[in-house]
Amino acid sequence: MNKDLILDASHALAYEEIFSYINEPALTWWKAINTFIQQKYQVSPKISYSKCAAQKGWNVKYQKSGKSLCTLYPEKESFIILIVIKLELVDYIESMASTYDPAVMEIARNARPFNGTKWLMIPVESKAILKNVQDLLVFKHEMSTSKKTAKHKEQ
């Protein structure tokens, strides 16, 4: 019996191996989000293994200035992106609900608050959801950056 490549902690997964694991059309979306993140934020992927019961297996993490941008969890027919947002951004996202796929809004509304954040585990299963997660990443980063700039000006 073959071990699942993503769940096999004994195998040090290479970034490129994920490309042969994910099926189309999710592979196209996977490549698109990774390229988007790497180019927009000038960051490199970090492969790590999670033993977390919520989403066990190999994943791809992106960080900017020591802060998490997102984590990607590959699956055969799709992938999940974890975007952690501060609770103060939830109202802004809600005010833009008409621009998001209903599935994304349901996740945002139903995610439980945790330490002043919401952890949005979003399955990317369409081009529309891919666009939504790109928009959420940009929004999260812009809000974070604008708050730092405002805080710096106050000092």
Image (tube, rainbow, N blue to C red):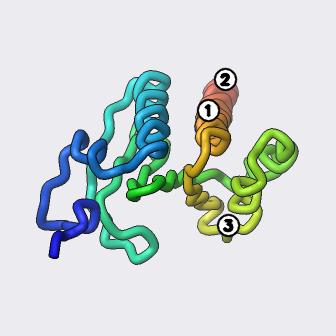
Q: How many marks?
A: 3
Q: Residue at x 76, y 44 (%)?
A: 100
The residue that mark 2 highlights is 153
Residue 155 shows in the view = no
Q: Secondary structure at mark 2?
A: helix
Q: Residue at x 47, y 46 (%)?
A: 26
Q: Does residue 81 sit above or below 40 in this rendering?
A: below
Q: Residue at x 44, y 41 (%)?
A: 30
> Are there few (<14), some (14-19), or many (20+) residues within 10 Å of tag 3?
some
Q: Earlier in the sequence, mark 1 or mark 2?
A: 1
**Position of residue 153 measured from the top left corner of the image (x, y, whole percent):** 66, 23
**Residue 130 left/right relative to 81:** right
> Are there few (<14), some (14-19), or many (20+) residues within 10 Å of tag 1?
some
Residues marked 1 and 2 touching at CB (< 8 Å): no
Q: Does residue 59 sit above or below 51 in this rendering?
A: above
The residue that mark 1 highlights is 138
**Position of residue 124 measured from the top left corner of the image (x, y, whole percent):** 56, 50
* Number of the label disc, if any, that sits on residue 111: 3
**Residue 113 left/right relative to 94:** left
Residue 133 shows in the view = yes
